[in-house]
Structures are given as structure tokens and as C-alpha cells.
Amino acid sequence: MSAPITLTIKWNGQEFILKDLHDTQTVKDVKQSITELTGVLPMRQKLLGLKSKKGKPAEDDTALSELKLKPNMKIMMMGTREETIATANEKPKDAPKVIDDFDVDDEEVLTENREEFLKKIERRIREYKIEEISAPRPGKKLLVLDIDYTLFDHRSVAETAVELMRPYLHEFLTSAYEHYDIVIWSATGMKWIQAKMQELGVSKNTNYKITFYVDSGAMITVHTPKYGVVEVKPLGVIWGKYEQYNSNNTIMFDDIRRNFLMNPQNGLKIRPFRQAHLNRDSDRELIRLSRYLRDIAALDDLSSLNHRNWEKYSLKRHHEDGPE
Ligand code: MG
């Protein structure tokens, strides 16, 4: 008899360890054990990254011996308990207010330890590997997008990822792609980024292409007098790797302003998309931002704009141009 198998299931920010599985057991048995630990019914579970040795997605009746498993493998699960689905489908009477993350002042740009941070960026430029999905296109600007709360509500519960997708995501990406190469940069791991982009139908979309994904490995920690140690997304890593992209032609959307600390002039703080069930019928942020991207696409220097005023910029322009 072969050695028992241990799997770690990541779900809802927690880890659940399944021990003493045997290779004669099936995916269905694993799901049953997960139900005991999490309360999520097998039919509601989606196990990401679980593949057969032939590379096909695992079916319920696939035996563990047929799967590509690594020792102590971590598997991400998407799924929701029945009672949570019931609650989520009822609209709460008093929607809690959106709590904004702390706002970092642009003035407070880390002059003190700047050298040290630049060294960290240099190291990332040397050591962080970018795997291009599609080649950068000459003459295009660069749009860098966060995922969680920017394109996707990662905290609400739903049966499918698509329910948590920010409305008009594909329309937005299609429109942006005309003038911008698109990069996704999330503070999570590459595996999760790939899984989410696949679930949302971004990775294989025929109307636009993503140039590459960047994960937490390209971030650096900086120390600010006001907020202590925080992790940020320094665009310098991309600029150092690609001559085509620079501070003049790059814009980055993120719901957390501190991610722009190393390049505040290039960041646009998007309103977070939370409580998808409440907001998915009314959220128009991506439509409006499509328009802004289109409006500024012809400018030689995006960093001379104050992206805090992006809404006014579009209004003014469209006013001058007359109605659309
Ligand atoms: Mg975010």
C-alpha cells in the first residue's frame, strides 16, 4: 500500500489539512472530507489546479493515483456554504459603509530611504522573471491593473467567480487594449492570478490580450515615517525590464493608494468594488474609466496629469467636444 497523502485546502482565507488520504480514494471522497471541515457541499466546491496526470481537469470519479499531486500540495477551493448563499442573495436593509483604506499623501514620498528602495527595485529587475503571454506592441502605452476590489470582489461569496466580476470588465479591457498594453499585477501568488483570470474569462478572451501577469514577488517593502512597513508595487520593476514602458506612458489602477508610493504620479485610485451582490447592477466605474483612458491616450506624458481629478478631466473634455 502506498504512503498516505496529505493535501492542504485553502478556502476563505483559511487552510484546512486533509491527512491520511489514500491513492485509491477519488476526488469525490476528497470533496466529502472538505464538506466535513468547511460545511461547503461537494456540488458547490470548485478545486482549482487539480489536474490528472494527462493534464485534464480532475473529475469526481478520478482516483487520487491518477492525479498530478505534489507532497503536501495546496489546493485553492472556491465554494460557498448554503446558508451563506441564502444570506448573500437577500439584499441587506442597511448596507454597511465602504471603509476606505488609508490615504497616503503624495508629498510623503520616502525621500529618506529612497536609495535603499531603489536598490530593492534593481534587484527585482534582475531577479524577477516575467513570462510574457503576448508580446508588447510598439507604440502602445501601458495599463497596469490590480485584481482584488479593482476588477473582482474577492471577499463576497458566490457560486461562480463571474458573479463577483466588476461589471463591464470585458468591455473595459477591450476598449483599453486599443491604446494600451495590459498588465495584471496582484499582491497574491501567480497561481491564484492565473486561476482568477481563467475563471473570469480574461485569459482566453478573443477581443484583447493580456501582455503579462505580475505577482507579489515583484513587490517591495518600504518603510514610511507615517505608516510603518508596507508592501508596494513599484512600476520601476516593469520599466527596468522594458524600455518601451516608462513613467510618461504608464498608468496603474489600484484600490489601495499606498501601492503607488514609489510612483504616485502614475497611479489612479479606483473606487473599490465590494459587495458585488449589492453593487453589480449600479457600478459603472469601468465604463467611465474606459472613457478616461481613451481621452488621455493621445497625450505624450500621462504623468503630468493629476489622476485624482480624472472624473473632472473627462467631463471638461466632453463638455468642450459637445455631446458624445
Ligand atoms: Mg486591490
Image (tube, rainbow, N blue to C red):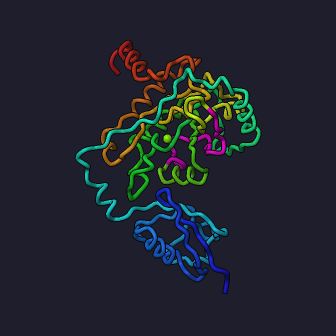
The quadrant in which the N terminus is found is bottom right
**Frontmost residue, 175 versus 301:** 301
- Relative to 52, 13 lies left or right: left
Instruction: Find residue 106 and report its horizontal and vertical position in percent.
Output: 54, 23
- Relative to 270, 133 lies left or right: right
The quadrant holding residue 323 is: top left
- Relative to 47, 220 lies left or right: right
**Frontmost residue, 166 versus 209:** 166
Instruction: Find residue 101 and report its horizontal and vertical position in percent.
Output: 45, 36
- Residue with the most extreme top position: 320
281 drawn magenta: no
Magenta segment, which residues? 202-223
* Residue for point 74% across, 32% down: 119
Q: Count all numbered tags in the image, as a single digit.
A: 0
205 drawn magenta: yes
* Residue for point 51% across, 45% down: 206
- Residue with the most extreme left position: 93
The quadrant holding residue 271 is: top left
For residue 16, above or below residue 300 = below
For residue 33, above or below residue 319 = below
The quadrant in which the C terminus is found is top left
Instruction: Find residue 111 and report its horizontal and vertical position in percent.
Output: 65, 23
Instruction: Find residue 113 and report its horizontal and vertical position in percent.
Output: 69, 27
